[in-house]
Image (cartoon, grey):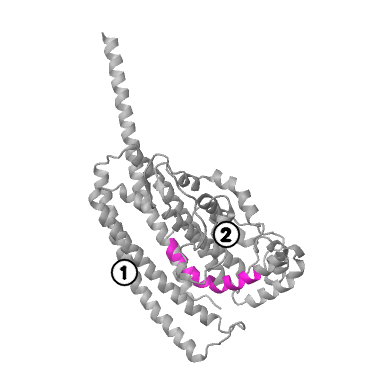
Amino acid sequence: MKISKSVINAVLVSVASLVMSGCSVMQSGAESLAQVPSLENQANRIVVGMGLVRTNTVIANMPISADATWPDALNDELVLEDNKQMISDALDMDPYVATHEYTDLYQKTQLGGFGLVAAPRIGALTYSALNRAVILYGPDKENWPTFFDIETDLSTFHKFTDGNLKQVEASSANVYPSVTDALISLMPTNFQKDLQDAREEMIIGFKEVAALKSEKGMYETQIETNDDASQTEALDEQAIIDLKQKILEIDTSISEKEIVADEKETIYTSLLDEATKVLESDIELDEEQVALAKNILLASSAIKKGALEAGGAFALSTTILATTNIVQDFPKELASLAVARIYIPDDKADLFDKRLSRLGKNALYAIPAIAIGTYYAVKQSLLAGRYESIAEIIVEADKLQKEAERDRLVDEENAKNEAKEAS
């Protein structure tokens, strides 16, 4: 199993277009220094990045209204702090979280790493991702989607396939099926249909690119796992050559589809720009519409932050995988876990077995998942940033109008007082 230069370059170049910020991203980088230098930890980081991309999809498609409270909760650091204990309790029985503290020290003696610095039980990005689960799915972990298993069907990468979302109710405002629908509702009426159609075309374009990246990932995984003893039928030399040829053909198709998808994105964003200019020239929105714009701003900010965090996770893992022998040392890593079993308490033995089982699959699909995840993270960040800008225009215009009205009333009051004094 190896990580190709094309994957490395694609990830690092794409993530360079994201502005790395946020303390959770910085903390994740610091945490990596204290972790066992293992493929398991990189796979776990990639999985958390996947969770952030998927929660972004949930946020983008969450029903939203002027009086919805979930957008504000997603951006409230106090909510995150309040939810940390709940998240910690929920992960008490997670196979990795419950057992890695028993195996870390021995693995570091075998694989390297700073033995005197203990890795955190739960990482900062994990708290950030699962905080979203609490807000969107509720406090009962039974309703949360599956976060820590990489789906073998990479075509579903960008969304969860399970979980029960909270019902969003509006006490007095109109409810819109998604953030985009809400945003378009604020645009001039004669632009709304074209915006909806252009957005649908853009989404189709993104999905076509992601589907090809998924297919490529499947072929790469077949080649990478060909020497795995668990495979019932090994590929012969000709079959491997055929798969490599298919990968080259898919690379060409990906490039072509990305051009088409980018063109569709440009059409949509150009329409947004045109509609925004018309909106700016004569903003006449009522209080409910302004409150809706504020919630769109909050939701878009949460999506952009999640995309930045996901991009940071993918970039960090890509860098570590590309600059170390972690992938080549995977057999040694598995051997170290086999020996470290003796440090696992009896009551956690079943969890340790589940950890090994999950590692086998997650390690297998982690590398193909990086390219797909980075693609989605970049697209999510750029689009959310544009939505932020539009919502800010509306919010700022309302603020200026209210300030102007306040100043007018003050001037009128001052004029009346001056007139009284003069008389």
The dot on residue 360 is none
Residue 94 picture location, percent across and down: 64, 61
Q: Quadrant of residue 401?
A: top left
Residue 129 is left or right of residue 356, and the answer is left
Numbered disc total: 2
Residue 262 is left or right of residue 166, and the answer is left
Between circles 1 and 2, the one closer to the viewer is 1
Magenta-colored stretch includes residue 368? yes
The dot on residue 260 is 1
Residue density around tag 2, few if under 14, some if 14–19, many if 20 or more, within 10 Å: some
Q: Nearer the viewer, residue 35 or 174?
A: 174
Q: Nearer the viewer, residue 60 or 369?
A: 60
Q: Nearer the viewer, residue 67 or 411?
A: 67
Q: Is residue 242 above or below residue 7?
A: below
Residue 60 picture location, percent across and down: 42, 55
The dot on residue 29 is 2
Q: What stretch of residues is rendered in magenta?
A: 355-377
Residue 109 picture location, percent across and down: 72, 69
Q: Quadrant of the N terminus?
A: bottom right
Amino acid at pointer 1 = Val
Seen as rendered, the residue at the extreme left is 190
